[in-house]
Image: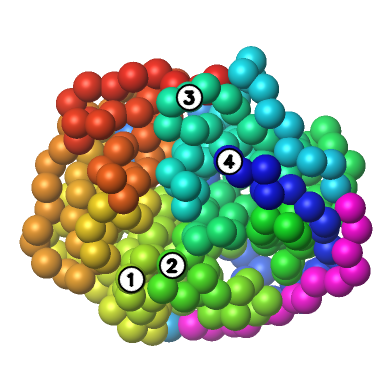
Amino acid sequence: MSAGWSGAQSATPLHRPPDPSHDEVIMIIPRRSLALTLAAVLTLAACSGAADSPAPTSPTSETSGASAAPTTQPSARATTDVQIDHVHGLGFSPDGAILVGSHSGVYSIPADGSETTLVGGISFDAMGMTPVGDRIYASGHPGTDDHVALTAPNLGLIQFQPGSGWEAIALAGEVDFHALTASAADPDVIVGVSSGRAVVELSTDGGQTWQDIADGPAFDVVVSQDTPELILSTSENGPMVSTDQGATFAPAEGAPFLGLVEPDLSRPDGVVGVDVDGVIWSGSLTGSDDWEELGRSTGSAAAIARAPDGRLVISGDGGLQVSSDDGQTWTGIGGA
């Protein structure tokens, strides 16, 4: 991670107005410590909850928020002796470093695993995390560090950029996204699944405002890095795909029964995922049947990502591991 990944912050708590149409909702099944089982049910080690998944519908509500005055933050912390607990999300920075969203913050680990850096120098429970370009979007809960961007009990959406540091974007204190995804083609397009509402939500303005695009609990969600209109969500009813940025969803024909999904940066409109048997798949969000079976996860999987050079990184029972041969063999890395 470059030295520029630290800096000033800006944040003011932002609140989601109550939505009377969602007085009674089924809890989203959290992505935290997701375990894939033969019974086609995703179980959780640290959070729990399950529900039937009704057919997605068109948008039903909209929320908004804004950020405010800047403040300073500590510089990034770098060490070779870090224990990263409870990994919730994985991704890659523009320079190829592995980004790890965990119970104690977002970490950067270079490809050789030589040093682990706490991004922005701020510790918090990153329940949801997705990198896109030089940005990192995250959500979750405050940790041991007191910082203006970290609002209890839920962070809403926060963002990191080199030179600016962590800042609150929207929904501070209100929302805990357990799944986040954003499109490299348009980083203002963000899709999230929160722990408290049985909906998939979309923002097209960098997280300032949000609208519901699908009802019902979802395990995970991914948006294409090349075509921001393409979105895939996973649930106990199987993968559902939208080609019109969430206006409609339909079953993803030919797709395996995936639980975890993330962008596959090694192919156009790519998606990489883990199915209920622990098999890793690479496919396309364009609706084709071009799904390739890769290797297998080592035990239950909590998070996965694939780099432009084809490297796979996975976290779960086997710790944080990297593969350069499509998941056939794995090497432990970092402190997870």
For marks 1 and 2, give the CA distance: 7 Å
Number of the label disc, if any, that sits on residue 226: 1
For marks 2 and 4, give the CA distance: 19 Å
Quadrant location of the N terminus in the rendered image: top right
Name the N-terminal-most of marks 3 and 4: 4
- 15 sits left or right of 197 in the view: right
Q: Amino acid at mark 4?
A: Met
Tag in front: 2 or 4 = 4
Q: Which residue matches tag 4?
A: 1
**Image location (x, y in percent) of residue 136:** 59, 55
Q: Amino acid at mark 2?
A: Ala
For marks 3 and 4, give the CA distance: 11 Å
> CB of mark 4 within 8 Å of CB of mark 1?
no
Q: Is residue 285 one of those drawn in magenta? A: no
Most prominent secondary structure in the magenta stretch? loop
Which region of the structure is painted magenta? Answer: 59-72
Secondary structure under the numbered disc 4 in the rendered image = loop
| Label 2 CA crowd tier, 10 Å (few <14, some 14–19, many 20+) | some
Q: Which residue matches tag 2?
A: 184
Residue 206 versus residue 251: which sits nearer the camera?
206
